[in-house]
Image (tube, coloured by chain):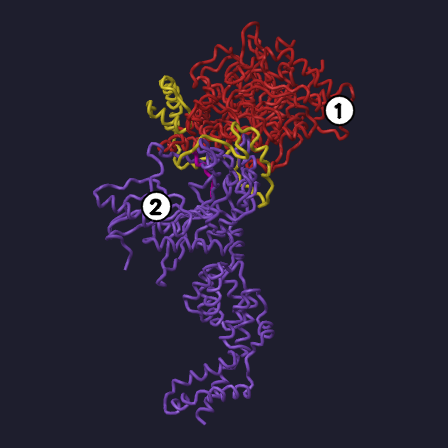
Chain colours: A yellow, B red, C purple
């Protein structure tokens, strides 16, 4: 599978990364290099192998928390690093639905 | 020289009253002042804060296990009130309103933070040169040549080697503790996944990330790990297992220990120097009473490719939160919509390697490719873990080189990403399998650069690594110092 | 006859998002209360701060299992959380934690009741847990949207139905039933005004006997009435497209409640690719069958069971249906009926009581009359203290201050008169004043008997014991 320029643009858009037209050929070559390399996995027989998702060795299951309010109530801390604070809200360019 | 003290030595000197926390901190701050401009290890320093903490430590009646010990922190650990950047422009001047579990535990044990250490951007790299703060230089650099310290925790290793801290906090996703430790001639351990809480550590690849210590001795690493480790209810992947006295394990004999030697790690083109150190290491362990057994880890050859699917996939999702809305860098032109804001901020905020991994990760998860890449990689991951589970039937620990080469020059870096990724060839399997791995300095190359050996162990058997690591350390008697320190 | 529009059959499936009733959010300890000050119920996890990690709220798991049991569904002892990746201003992590490949609840079914009394089974495909997003306010500033993350991370259950519904009424009845079940279970308050329950409506049309045609999804419809309207509007639009020779494109649409039409929501260029993958921060969600059995044993009686019990008590299926629609109503009814004539109690609750609620714009949860007092009123009728007619007057007085009916009857002297002397005196007076009618009655106009009863009751201000009045009049007229 080889990425064409259109796919590079589509993926960049999915990832919300602005890519200039003149960056495309370089990126395309790099990504194809990496993908070409990882495609070696295709040759490995993985018939019947259960995919391993998590990092915990020996498996693990989800620990549960109690249904108790232990967080929130920190408006100032939540907003302290905001690039655009509007009152007690985060401001963003108007979203038109 | 107070900066020459190991953690064990410093604890003794503090206890006997030979020195105090303020003196120790001041000595390190002076060393930093002198060397940091050349090394670019620390990216955020806060001398007043450090000295305040040292004074508080000296005044404390209840002594913690690390009382008065100055430490450097990789700038991936969120520190309350202290800028945290992940080596990226995207975080701007982000000041966390919270403290990571690990650094909070160290603080509670009496440790004093010297400042925040450079790293590859978002821990993605093996050279510490992808940082927005510029590269960190390996203190072993001879003359005018600038060597890389390894990465991503390059500065954490460099600072320890250059005596700018007796110990540092680092993280390891594919080798980011063990590879720079080897390049800089220090010890470093990546614990079992789940041993140390990830809460408050900026995520790169969540199923692979694990924090660990770096120090000049194996025992110092053991002391630090004991304070860092433990169950944390705030991290759902944190393991609820007891934390043993790791330092005690350092004195344990390796007599009868079965050391596995994986045939597949004897790569074609492995540098003869590395091969020699590896053989030497096996010899030392044998002399100490260990038994050497050949083993096979047949899927190792696919570990890197597996890693470069899994890690970017997770990273592409983990780094989606850096969008210029709630914190960090925002770049927007006049009249830009929300998507323009995202795209501009992220393009301006992320460096080339991070962008590359986000794109790869986005692609391998996207519709139509998930099974061929991501699911396949997860199956390989299962096979790699199974390789180890089978190996543990015939051995207790595995000895391998830590890196395929010694530290290389900053301007000798391969421009091709795939060649660069090969740096992690020996370390990455431990992250994929979730097992612990330690890197111990074992000798010098012909050029006089440090070479490291890696020991891998069963899940939650870090004690075995400390025992074997300390045995190697005693045999190697590594006492060389970087030129700029000696 | 099945429902069609111009010969077209409708195929409808619903994806319902129900807010889980819990104190804290799904993966953080921030509160879930409605209407709090902006960003005041936001933890660092909910704000997507670097290094923050999710930890699941066990009660949300239990609530999902309870709901699954209420939907007669398979409960999966092993399930998993996946990340659904997309960018939006009110989605702080850049992904929603959801359950894509392995939901906590699998196939189930619910029975819906239609207006004509018939019932129908609607299949449940799955139920899964997921996080809600924050809220964007678009009307606060000329060029900016404001983001409030209070809802970010609140637990939702997404309940997906099979495409089993065939009319707007069925869609409405299904949503009504889901809401009813969850309110009985206490797993979702079903408050649609506060956004606790929203539905995405999938609609397609076809000629009877055909396979499925392309469907469209109408997003975020927030009332049962609007669901029914949206189904019809969308079906009519699609019929028009097909009939004019066009094809319906699969797309997401919005229901414009003002104009009563649906409109396209996103351009195709923006087609989503959610890149689902297992959330590496969250190991699988695993629990035992014992856990499920424990929850099952503690489940409250559900509406279907309750309805069947009411029918067995002698109520009409309709009354039983009406009384079980809301749990509060059923509980109220049972207190009124306790130890009394269930049918009489049902008549009073569905009759005078409901009428009064309607008139006063109140509901059972803030009832103007307590169930205890209404029950006492029935006792007063049963033991002959007052007549049914007087009871209605007493009830009106009770509505004002929820006073004990016995003391109302006492203080206002409404007690039924059983003294034959007083009744005879009143009867004599009535008969004397209506000598002409007495003559007519005696010549065979039997129907006038009722007139005399009415006059005597009127003279006694309704307090005469009806049986005694009858008896006395009968004796006097025949005598």
Asked if residue C85 lies in the magenta stretch, the reply is yes
Q: Position of residue C52 (x, y in %)?
A: 55, 33
The residue at which mark 1 appears reads as B58
- At label 1, counting other C-alpha atoms closer than 10 Å, the crowd grade (few under 14, some 14-19, many 20 or more) is some
The relative height of residue B9 versus residue C350 in the rendered view (above or below) is above
Q: Position of residue A85 (x, y in %)?
A: 53, 30
- In the picture, the quarter occupied by the C terminus of chain C is bottom left
- At label 2, counting other C-alpha atoms closer than 10 Å, the crowd grade (few under 14, some 14-19, many 20 or more) is few
Residue B290 shows up from this direction: yes
Does residue A38 appear to the left or right of C369 in the view shown?
A: left
Secondary structure found at label 1: helix
Residue B71 sits in which quadrant?
A: top right
Point out the residue furthest to the left here: C245
Residue C474 sits in which quadrant?
A: bottom left
Does residue B144 appear to the left or right of B302 in the view shown?
A: right
Residue B485 sits in which quadrant?
A: top right
The relative height of residue C79 versus residue A79 in the rendered view (above or below) is below
Q: Chain of mark 2?
A: C
- Along the line of sight, which residue is nearer the eye, B189 or B415? B415
Q: Residue at x 51, y 50 (%)?
A: C63
Q: Which mark is residue C259?
A: 2
Point out the stretch of residues depicted in magenta.
Answer: C79-86
Residue B441 shows up from this direction: no
Secondary structure found at label 2: loop
Q: Position of residue C108 (x, y in %)?
A: 41, 52
- Along the line of sight, which residue is nearer the eye, B5 or B105? B105
Dominant secondary structure of the residues highlighted in magenta in the image: strand
């Amino acid at each position: 599978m080889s990425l064409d320029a259109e796919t590079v643009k589509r993926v960049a858009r999915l990832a919300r990364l602005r890519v200039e037209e003149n960056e495309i050929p370089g990126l395309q070559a790099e990504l194809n290099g990496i993908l070409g390399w990882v495609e070696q996995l295709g040759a490995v027989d993985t018939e019947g192998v259960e995919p391993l998702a998590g990092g915990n060795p020996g498996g693990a299951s989800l620990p549960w928390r109690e249904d108790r309010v232990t967080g929130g109530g920190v408006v100032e801390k939540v907003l302290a690093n905001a690039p655009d604070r509007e009152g007690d809200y985060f401001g963003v360019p108007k979203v038109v639905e | 020289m107070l900066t020459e003290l190991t953690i064990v030595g410093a604890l003794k000197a503090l206890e006997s009253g030979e020195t105090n926390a303020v003196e120790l901190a001041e000595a390190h701050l002076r060393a930093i002042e002198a060397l940091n401009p050349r090394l670019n290890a620390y990216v955020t320093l806060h001398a007043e804060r450090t000295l305040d903490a040292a004074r508080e430590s000296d005044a404390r009646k209840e002594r913690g296990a690390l009382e008065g010990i100055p430490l450097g922190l990789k700038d991936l650990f969120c520190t309350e009130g202290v800028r945290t950047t992940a080596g990226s422009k995207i975080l701007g001047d982000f000041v966390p309103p919270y403290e990571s579990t690990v650094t909070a535990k160290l603080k509670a044990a009496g440790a004093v933070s010297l400042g925040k250490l450079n790293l590859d951007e978002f821990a993605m790299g093996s050279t510490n040169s992808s940082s927005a703060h510029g590269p960190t230089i390996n203190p072993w650099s001879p003359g005018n040549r600038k060597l890389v310290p390894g990465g991503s925790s390059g500065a954490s290793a460099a600072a320890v080697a250059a005596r700018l801290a007796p110990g540092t906090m680092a993280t390891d996703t594919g080798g980011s503790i063990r590879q720079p430790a080897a390049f800089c001639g220090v010890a470093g351990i990546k614990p079992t996944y789940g041993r140390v809480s990830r809460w408050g550590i900026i995520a790169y690849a969540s199923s692979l990330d694990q924090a660990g210590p770096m120090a000049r001795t194996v025992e110092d690493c053991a002391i630090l790990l004991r304070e860092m480790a433990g169950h944390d209810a705030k991290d759902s992947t944190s393991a609820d297992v007891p934390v043993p006295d790791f330092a005690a394990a350092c004195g344990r004999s390796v007599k009868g220990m079965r050391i596995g030697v994986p045939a597949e790690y004897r790569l074609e083109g492995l540098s003869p120097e590395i091969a020699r150190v590896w053989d030497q290491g096996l010899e030392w362990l044998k002399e100490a009473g260990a038994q050497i057994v050949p083993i096979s880890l047949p899927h190792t050859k696919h570990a890197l490719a597996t890693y470069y699917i899994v890690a970017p996939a997770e990273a592409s999702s983990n780094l989606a939160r850096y969008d210029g809305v709630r914190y960090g860098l925002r770049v927007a032109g006049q009249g830009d919509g929300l998507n323009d804001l995202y795209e501009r901020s992220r393009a301006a905020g992320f460096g080339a390697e991070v962008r590359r991994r986000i794109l790869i990760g986005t692609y391998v998860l996207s519709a139509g490719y998930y099974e061929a890449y991501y699911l396949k990689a997860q199956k390989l991951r299962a096979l790699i873990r199974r390789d180890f589970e089978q190996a543990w039937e015939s051995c207790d620990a595995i000895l391998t080189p830590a890196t395929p080469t010694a530290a290389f020059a900053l301007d000798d870096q391969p421009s091709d990403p795939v060649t660069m990724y090969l740096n992690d060839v020996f370390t990455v399997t431990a992250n994929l399998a979730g097992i612990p791995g330690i890197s111990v300095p074992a000798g010098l190359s012909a050029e006089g650069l440090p070479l490291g050996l890696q020991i891998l162990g069963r899940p939650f058997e870090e004690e075995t690594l400390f025992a074997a690591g300390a045995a190697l350390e005693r045999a190697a008697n590594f006492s060389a110092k970087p030129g700029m320190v000696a | 006859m099945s429902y069609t529009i111009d010969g077209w059959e409708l195929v409808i499936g619903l994806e319902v998002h129900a807010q889980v009733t819990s104190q804290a959010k799904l993966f953080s300890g921030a509160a879930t209360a409605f209407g709090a000050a902006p960003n005041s119920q936001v933890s660092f996890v909910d704000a997507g701060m670097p290094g923050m990690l999710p930890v699941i709220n066990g009660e949300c798991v239990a609530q999902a299992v309870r709901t699954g049991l209420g939907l007669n569904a398979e409960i999966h002892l092993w399930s998993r959380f996946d990340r659904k990746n997309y960018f939006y201003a009110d989605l702080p992590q850049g992904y929603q934690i959801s359950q894509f490949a392995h939901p906590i609840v699998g196939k189930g079914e619910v029975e819906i009741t239609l207006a004509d009394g018939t019932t129908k089974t609607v299949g449940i495909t799955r139920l899964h847990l997921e996080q809600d997003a924050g809220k964007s306010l678009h009307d606060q500033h000329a060029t900016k949207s404001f983001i409030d993350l209070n809802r970010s991370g609140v637990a939702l259950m997404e309940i997906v139905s099979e495409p089993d519904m065939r009319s707007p009424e069925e869609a409405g009845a299904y949503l009504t039933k889901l809401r009813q079940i969850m309110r009985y279970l206490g797993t979702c308050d079903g408050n649609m005004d506060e956004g606790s329950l929203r539905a995405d409506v999938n609609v397609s049309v076809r000629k009877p006997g055909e396979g499925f045609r392309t469907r469209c999804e109408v997003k975020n419809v927030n009332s049962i009435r609007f669901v029914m309207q949206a189904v019809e509007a969308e079906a009519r639009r699609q019929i028009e497209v097909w009939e004019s020779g066009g094809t319906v494109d699969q797309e997401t649409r919005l229901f414009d409640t003002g104009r009563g039409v649906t409109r396209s929501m996103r351009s195709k260029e923006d087609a989503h690719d959610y890149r689902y993958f297992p959330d590496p921060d969250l190991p699988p969600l695993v629990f035992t069958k014992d856990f499920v059995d424990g929850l099952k044993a503690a489940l409250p009686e559900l509406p279907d069971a309750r309805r069947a019990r009411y029918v067995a008590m002698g109520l009409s299926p309709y009354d039983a249906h009406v009384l079980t629609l809301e749990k509060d109503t059923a509980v109220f009814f049972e207190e009124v009926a306790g130890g009394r004539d269930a049918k009489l109690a049902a008549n009073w609750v569905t009759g005078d009581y409901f009428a009064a609620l309607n008139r006063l714009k109140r509901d059972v949860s803030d009832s103007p009359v307590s169930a205890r007092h209404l029950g006492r009123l029935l006792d007063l009728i049963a033991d002959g203290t007052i007549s049914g007619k007087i009871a209605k007057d007493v009830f009106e007085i009770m509505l004002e201050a929820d006073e004990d009916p016995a003391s109302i009857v006492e203080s206002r002297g409404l007690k039924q008169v059983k003294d034959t002397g007083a009744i005879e005196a009143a009867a004599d007076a009535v008969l004397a004043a209506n000598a002409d009618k007495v003559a007519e009655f005696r010549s065979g106009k039997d129907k006038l008997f009722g007139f005399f009863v009415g006059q005597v009751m009127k003279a006694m201000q309704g307090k005469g014991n009806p049986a005694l009045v009858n008896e006395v009049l009968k004796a006097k007229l025949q005598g």
